[in-house]
């Protein structure tokens, strides 16, 4: 039972345009959501997070939106750059332990010049 | 700081063999954890530790043992390797187990069990 789902295995975007990565979750007890970025042969690195009490969080070119009623979050990257090409993982945690993350399957983002 | 280090980077085992995946962090973090990444399934939590001497099971603990004798080290032991344990293993650490501390991941160990 996949509690966190990223239904798009891959996404291709032109450099300079907006990249939108989506994530859905099923467990209403999740209260903290994160995005991690992963390059080949490296471990995931933290990108941005959002608490369930917010609906938006921005950090430079990266914005995460949370729609609790739809159990959906998205990551917007504007403008997209070639260095953004990586696999992006959505993750969630709940009251049972903020560090016990449940990950989605990942979306491979490719930025084309 | 070296951050989170993992050894070896690659390992091939035969079914039934045992081995230990090493993980160390030099950031004095209380919390450490092990995840495995399989194609199409994201990362899944195997075991975690909230401090030296304290460990607990995650989502997929069967076939793995851990111990935490020091703050720095958190080795993962495969007792009798099986092909289903072929995966990429990531160790992570964070300052505490509370709140929203960022988890820092190591570079991973790619394990193949024949």
Image (tube, helix red, strand yellow):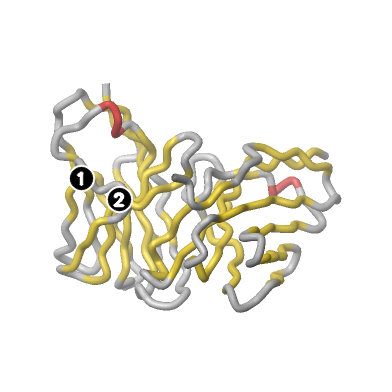
Image coordinates of residue B54 in percent, x first then y, are: 18, 68
Please name whichever residue, A104 or A69, is drawn nearer the observer in this view of the structure: A69
Residue pushed farthest top? B114
Above or below, comparing residue A10 to residue B68 in the picture: above
Determine which residue is flagged by label 2: B46
Asked whether the beta carbons under mark 1 and mark 2 sit within 8 Å of each other, the answer is yes
Which type of secondary structure does the marked residue at label 2 adopt?
strand
Residue B71, how many percent across, how many down?
Answer: 23, 69
Q: CA distance from mark 1 to mark 2?
A: 8 Å
The x and y percentages for residue B40 are 50, 36
Q: Which of the pair B87/A33 is nearer the observer?
A: A33
Q: Is residue B100 above or below residue B12?
A: below
In the displayed structure, B112 sits above or below A78; it is above
Drawn side of residue A46 relative to residue B8, left or right: right
Rendered residue at 35%/52% (across/down): B45
Quarter placement of the C terminus of chain A? top right
- Quarter of the figure with residue A111: top right
Query: Residue shown at 79%/38% (left/top)?
Result: A112
Q: Residue at x 85, y 50 (%)?
A: A17
- Report helix, strand or loop for mark 1: strand
Label placed on residue B87: none
Residue B65: percent from the left, percent from the top?
17, 49
- Residue at label 1? B64
Q: Indicate the quadrant where residue B2 lies.
A: bottom left
Q: Residue at 36% across / 35% down in the picture?
A: B87
The crowding category of the residue bearing disc 2, from other C-alpha atoms within 10 Å (few below 14, some 14 to 19, many at least 20), is: many
Q: Tell me how many marks there are.
A: 2
Please tell me which of labels 1 and 2 falls first in the chain: 2
Chain for numbered disc 1: B
Q: Chain of mark 2?
A: B
Q: Foreground residue, B24 or B104?
A: B104
Label 1 environment density (alpha carbons within 10 Å; few <14, some 14–19, many ≥20): some
């Amino acid at each position: 039972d996949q509690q966190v789902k990223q239904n798009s295995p891959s996404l291709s975007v032109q450099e300079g345009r907006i990249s939108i990565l989506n994530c859905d979750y099923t467990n209403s007890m999740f209260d903290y959501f994160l995005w991690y970025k992963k390059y080949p042969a490296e471990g995931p690195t933290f990108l941005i997070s959002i608490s369930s009490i917010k609906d938006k969080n921005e950090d430079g070119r990266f914005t995460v939106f949370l729609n609790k009623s739809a159990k959906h979050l998205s990551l917007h990257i504007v403008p997209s750059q070639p260095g953004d090409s990586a696999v992006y993982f959505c993750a969630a945690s709940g009251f049972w332990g903020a560090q016990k993350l449940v990950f989605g399957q990942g979306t491979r983002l490719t930025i084309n010049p | 700081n070296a951050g989170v280090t993992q050894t070896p980077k690659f390992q091939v085992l035969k079914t039934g063999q045992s081995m230990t995946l090493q993980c160390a962090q030099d950031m004095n973090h209380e919390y450490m954890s092990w995840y495995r990444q399989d194609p199409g399934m994201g990362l899944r939590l195997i075991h975690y530790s909230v401090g030296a001497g304290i460990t607990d099971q995650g989502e997929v603990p069967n076939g793995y043992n851990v111990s935490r004798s020091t703050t720095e080290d958190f080795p993962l032991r495969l007792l009798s390797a099986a092909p289903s344990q072929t995966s990429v293993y990531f160790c992570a650490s964070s300052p505490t187990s509370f709140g929203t501390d960022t988890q820092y991941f190591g570079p991973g160990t790619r394990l193949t069990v024949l």
